[in-house]
Amino acid sequence: MPKNMEIIWLFDFYGDMLTEKQRNVVELYYEEDLSLAEIAENQNITRQGVRDSIKRAEAQMIEMEERLHLAARFRGMRDGLEAIRQAAQDIQMLNDRTRYSREIDDRSKRIIQLAEELRER
């Protein structure tokens, strides 16, 4: 089973909605990079039990994302903020190369600042 970055991403959004057992095995498998056998030994369950638990957790997180779209919305907002920040920087560069306007410079700096503040939340 390839260690899928999408599942790690979904785990950040939906991990708290899984059972404690599912959270533990998903964390150990994806974040601690343990093998199924290592997790089975640590958790006192079979390797197949670990695999089944991971598969159920993955399916639940995918289903939650299909219903709620939290991860997709977050990505969209993050990408939009980055585009806004980049556009404001482009405006600053154009302003510097043409007739410089203090007002344009101040407003573009404010846009960049707001975008960075929102990204950090």
Image (tube, grey):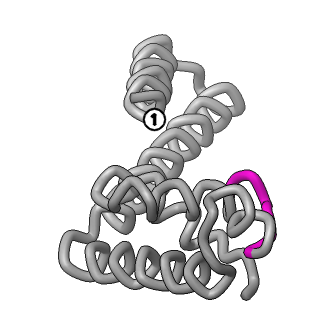
The quadrant in which residue 73 appears is: bottom left
Inspect the magenta stretch and tell me whether residue 101 lies in it.
no
The quadrant in which residue 75 appears is: bottom left
Near-viewer residue (8 or 75)? 8
Q: Residues within 10 Å of mark 1 (few under 14, many from 20)?
A: some
Could you tell me which quadrant the C terminus lies in?
top left
Task: Name the amino acid, label 1.
Answer: Arg
Please provide percent x and percent y for residue 114: 39, 25
Q: Is residue 104 left or right of residue 42?
A: left
Task: Give me the residue at 52% from left, 39% from top.
Answer: 85
Please provide percent x and percent y for residue 117: 42, 23
Please provide percent x and percent y for residue 104: 44, 23
Farthest residue toward the left? 67
Majority secondary structure in the magenta region: loop
Q: Is residue 49 left or right of residue 61?
A: right
Near-viewer residue (96 or 58)? 58
Residue labelled with disc 1: 119
Please provide percent x and percent y for residue 84: 45, 45
